[in-house]
Amino acid sequence: MSFGQGGPYGPGGSQPPQSSRPSTPDWAAMADHTAARGRRRRWLFIGGAVLATAAVGAMVATAVVSSNDGGGSSDDSAKHLPSQPTLPRESQSPEPSFSNVAPPAPPKPLDIISDAKRDKAPLSARTLFPDEEAAKEGRSYAKAATSSTASCAAGTQGALGSVLSGNGCRKLLRATFSRDGVAVTIGVAVFDGRAGAEKAKDGYKPNVASLSGGGVPSFCRQTACRTSANAIGRYAYFTISGYTSGKKVTTADTKALQAGRDMADYTFRRILARGNAQASAAAGSNG
């Protein structure tokens, strides 16, 4: 059969040559491909299994942590915990009881020595001035003589006697101390209460009479001397200080002045000690 000029493959064309053998598949290539695909599937399966195992482990760990956070624990863990300590039983001793009545307040020393009804300790020149020496800041004074009288004016000179008697003086106690040629006489006037002592101090006029004896001659009788007046509680106390030689005490003199101050301070402490002793005794008897 003719298709005209040039035939079916164009001018001057000819049919392409055909293989005389039928085509066959490449079995080796196909086998390699199949093996590679199997290996990929196997690795994917193994990886998935690993991921699944890790996920399960994470879930278990989370569950354990959550369980511990909630305060619970497995039986096996509880076996290894330390045993709870045994707490002491609550004491069965009775509750303390308190009295509704307050104990009496301890007496104050100043209150005692301000009232004759409370100031009951023995009182004399020897009990008020028991020390053979009186000391103040390293200065020591030797006791020379003591005196006690119920006639207060008898132990004074000048206008002091009337001041004491006018305010109800009950007793006058005197003591003399000396040091380095200077002597001091202390006179303690005793009243029923504080008011009489304060009035005697405020109305003071010279002076208490000096007391000689114990190696101390008469002094401050015909010459100028230092004097002072003060009071504590129901006691008014006075000093007169001067030279045993009869030397006049001038305003510039400090030796007689210092001696008078030292003995006034000593007397104050002795009277206050009397109150302290009685207050302590009263507190002990109340306890």
Image (spheres, rainbow, N blue to C red):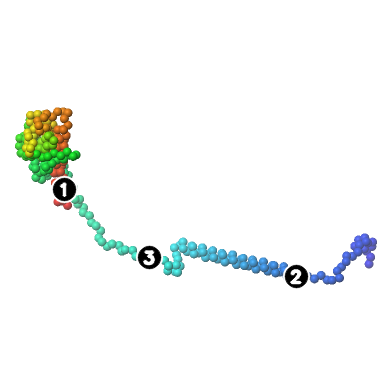
Cα distance in 3D space between marks 1 and 2: 127 Å
Q: Quadrant of residue 171?
A: top left
Q: Earlier in the sequence, mark 1 or mark 2?
A: 2
What's the CA distance linking mark 3 and mark 1? 56 Å
Numbered mark located on residue 28 in the image: 2
Please state, as top left, top right, bottom left or bottom right, where the N terminus lies in the image: bottom right
Q: Name the residue that disc number 1 marks.
A: 280
Q: Nearer the viewer, mark 3 or mark 1?
A: 1
Percent of width and height locating residue 38: 68, 69
Mark 1 crowdedness (10 Å alpha carbons): few <14, some 14-19, many ≥20: some
**Which one is in front, 231 or 13?**
231
Q: Earlier in the sequence, mark 3 or mark 2?
A: 2
Determine the residue positioned at 42% across, 67% down. Answer: 80
The amino acid beneath tag 2 is Ala
Using the rendered view, name the quadrant where residue 178 is placed.
top left
**99 above or below 257?**
below
Q: Can the viewer see residue 84?
A: yes
Q: List the residue tagged with mark 3.
A: 84
